[in-house]
Amino acid sequence: MIGTDFEKKIKDIMNKNILLIAASGLILLFGACAKEDSKNVNQDSIYSIYELFYNKNTDKTTAQATFRFGGPTGTLLELNSPAGVTFNGDKLSYNGITGVHKKEYSGSTTSGNYVYTDLDAKVFKNTIGTMDPLDFPVVDTIKTTGSYTLTWTGNPVGDNETISLTINGTQQANFEIASVSSKGATELIFPMNKLQKVGIGTANCILQRTFAKSTIDEGTSKGGRQAI
């Protein structure tokens, strides 16, 4: 996150196992926080975070809302009745381990509406925009003796968007990230030095599109952010 006003919309996430090899020749393509009750804080000092994630591997969508006291890095809050938050009319349940309110859906839910009601009976409505999907090309192996260019399947980078590829090596337990934010871009380059830090062997890869936004539709004086 960049500053207090940076808003990240994760529009789509795709995981893929990819084999990294060092040999030249054949190119095998691969690819504890403090928590508090909301009743104990000033309701106008609550910062809201609304997120919608779809994972193609699991074919599952997760809608979640996080509330923090005072700003984006403040204490996590559990909403106390009659306060609450819904997504498309469904109540989001609080998870005491992660400190978020969430609900999971089977399949892809590409957009929706969050409604948050605080203890002062004020209602805040926020709409999550439509996901713009992307996918890996047909790949399963890449050499680590040079940089790797990934041309994804899906629309180019749009306004205020970033597409990133994370490679997490299973043998070296190290991950590296490469990204591109240039509007109209259709590929990203993963540098050789980063691939070599990941090491050879099977790796888990995550491809995602993000959209940066500085405001939410409705919120307290502390504002909030969204993520799709």
Image (cartoon, grey):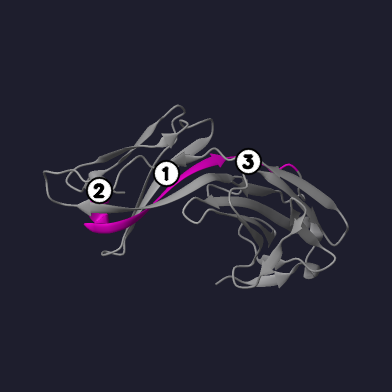
Label 1 SS: strand
| 161 sits to left or right of 7 | left
The count of marks equals 3
Q: Which residue is mark 3?
A: 214
Whole-Å distance between the Cαs marked 2 and 1?
Answer: 18 Å
Q: In this rendering, is residue 114 above or below 118?
A: above
Q: Earlier in the sequence, mark 3 or mark 2?
A: 2
Q: Amino acid at mark 2?
A: Thr
Q: Earlier in the sequence, mark 1 or mark 3?
A: 1
Provide the residue designation for mark 2. 141
Could you say which disc has been placed on residue 221 in the image? Answer: none
State which quadrant residue 173 falls in. Answer: bottom left
Res. 164 mark: 1
- What element does badge 2 sit on? strand
| Nearer to us: label 2 or label 1 | 2
Q: Residue at x 33, y 41 (%)?
A: 138
Question: Where is residue 194 shown, x and y percent of the image?
Answer: 27, 49
Outermost residue on the right side: it is 121
